[in-house]
Structure formats: structure tokens, C-alpha cells
Amino acid sequence: MIGVFDSGVGGLTVVKEIFKQLPQYQIIYFGDTARLPYGTKGEDFVQKYSVKITDWLIKNGAKVIVIACNTSSAWASDLLKKRFPNTPIFEMITPAVDDINNNHKFSKIGLIGTPGTIKSFAYQKRILKKNPNLKIIAQPCPLLVPLVEEGKVDGLVVQETCKEYLSVFDNENIDALILACTHYPLLKKTIEKIVGKNIKVINPAENLAKELKIFLKNNPKIEKQIKKGIDHQFFFSDEPYNFEKIKNLCFGKKFKKPIKILTGF
Ligand code: DGL
């Protein structure tokens, strides 16, 4: 199985991209709803639970891990790669950064994410390492996660909140905007309307799924170990608030899978 984890339900936007590009593989998903949000927590906390969840996913059949959470990717991906050297680990940041560095000629970009992701400087560091002249304007947007969790992806409150956060990019002439939080792709249409057509809005989940696809093609031994089929499993450490709404926004009403709660995880 492909093991996918997030702090909660936001990682379903990443699963959506995996389903699009890799529909044949079975997924085991873990959402740490008992401890959500990760975006306002510290590095040690996010690392501790990222290790615990990765270990659980591997013990429960995951042959590849996808960190479907930007905050966890920012704070914990290096540690996870060290702790679990025998399992390929994919995170949200590198595939998007590689695409920006290798395939585009941007001069100024915007970055929006949780306070943790922005503060970690993980995106900024990786971009500037290869592209030191690229200007990056970063803006934490903590209110967007609870709005999406409420199932609110358009309407007045969402528009006004997005407008306020995105106003830092007014008159800055950014070429692209990175949606560095798993919840934000659900706001993509609203965000695109505000920033305008000329700005490329980047969903890192698309880059991640593409990279995973290439990796599996080039590593047939690992690819063979991953279970195929649609018997996906969804685990949460507590009742996932508004799971149905978010699930429907990502996959539509027809997609029905039982969820399991691991109380005390
Ligand atoms: N999944 C988190 C991320 O992408 C957002 C939600 C949270 O703060 O836990 O950073």
C-alpha cells in the first residue's frame, strides 16, 4: 500500500492527486485528528507524531510513505528519512521546488502556508539554494485551515479572508503562488480569482504525485510490493470533524469508504 499521512483531513487533497495519476494503487491513510492542527505547533511536537505515524503505517503494510502535510514535510521529512532508511519517503516540498527551479523562469513568487511551514523556511531554503536571485514573499494564513474544515471554500467570508491575506502580493508582480498547505487546493478557484489569471497557482500535490509515479516506474522491485486495488483504508486518531464534507469536496458523494478511529493512538 501507499501510506499517506496528514494532521487531519487536508491530506485528502493529496490523495486526490495520487488517485488521478496513480489510480491502480491501494492507499492506507492516517489523519492525526486528535492533534490537529500541526500548523501552529512546534517542531518537536510535529516530529514526534510524524515518526509515530510513519512507524504505524509501515507496520500496517505501507511500502512507500507520502507525507501529505506541508507542516510535517517542513519539520519532519529529514528526520523521517533518517529513521526509516528502508522505506522511500515522499514529501510535499521537494517536487514542487524542483519543478520551479528546473522548469520555470520566475523572478518573484508568493508562498502561503501554515505559520509552521512559513517559519521553518523549508520552501524558501530549498528554492534559494538553486535559485538565489528568486524573490519570495511568504505569508502565513492560519485562518484558512479552519474555514476549509468547516467546508467553506467560497462565499463572502472565504473571499474576504483570502483577500486580506493575499493583499501582501498586491503591486508585487509575483509570477507564481505556491499553495503550501494541504487545505488550500480546495480554495484554488477563489484564490485564482483574487490573484488574477497571470499568476500561476501551484498545487504541490500535483508535483508530488508526478514524482511518485516516476519513482515507481524506475523502481519495479518496490512497485511490485505495493498492493493494487481500490480497497483503500482511512484511519484517524479521533473523530474527523466534517470528514464527509471534505471527502465530498475532494472525491464526490459517490466515493464511500468506512473510516476507522484509533482511539488512544
Ligand atoms: N495539513 C497541514 C499542512 O499542510 C494543515 C493543517 C494543520 O495545520 O494541521 O500544513
Image: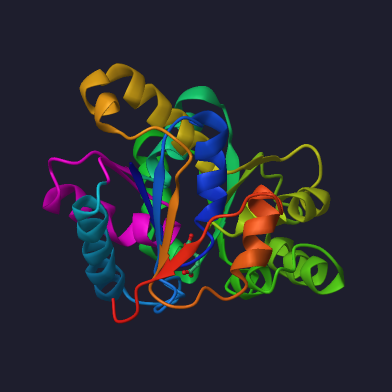
Coordinates of residue 156 in the picture (x, y in percent): 87, 71
Residue 180 in view of the camera: no
Q: Residue at x 57, y 44 (%)?
A: 16
Position of the N terminus by quadrant: top left
Coordinates of residue 148 in the picture (x, y in percent): 66, 67
The image shows residue 89, relative to residue 244, as above or below, that is above
Q: Residue at x 43, y 78 (%)?
A: 238
- Front-most of residues 127 and 71: 71
- Judge left or right: residue 131 versus residue 255: left
Magenta residues span 62-90
Position of the C terminus by quadrant: bottom left
Dividing the picture into quadrants, the one containing residue 159 is bottom right
Coordinates of residue 214 in the picture (x, y in percent): 39, 22
Q: What's the image's color scheme?
A: rainbow
Count of numbered marks: 0
Coordinates of residue 231 in the picture (x, y in percent): 45, 44
- Front-most of residues 19 and 161: 19
- Front-most of residues 159 and 169: 159
The image shows residue 161, relative to residue 186, as above or below, that is below
Magenta-colored stretch includes residue 188: no
Residue 137 in view of the camera: yes
The image shows residue 35, relative to residue 183, as above or below, that is below
- Judge left or right: residue 125 versus residue 54: right
- Judge left or right: residue 213 versus residue 201: left
- Front-most of residues 103 and 8: 8
Magenta-colored stretch includes residue 78: yes
Q: Residue at x 42, y 26 (%)?
A: 213
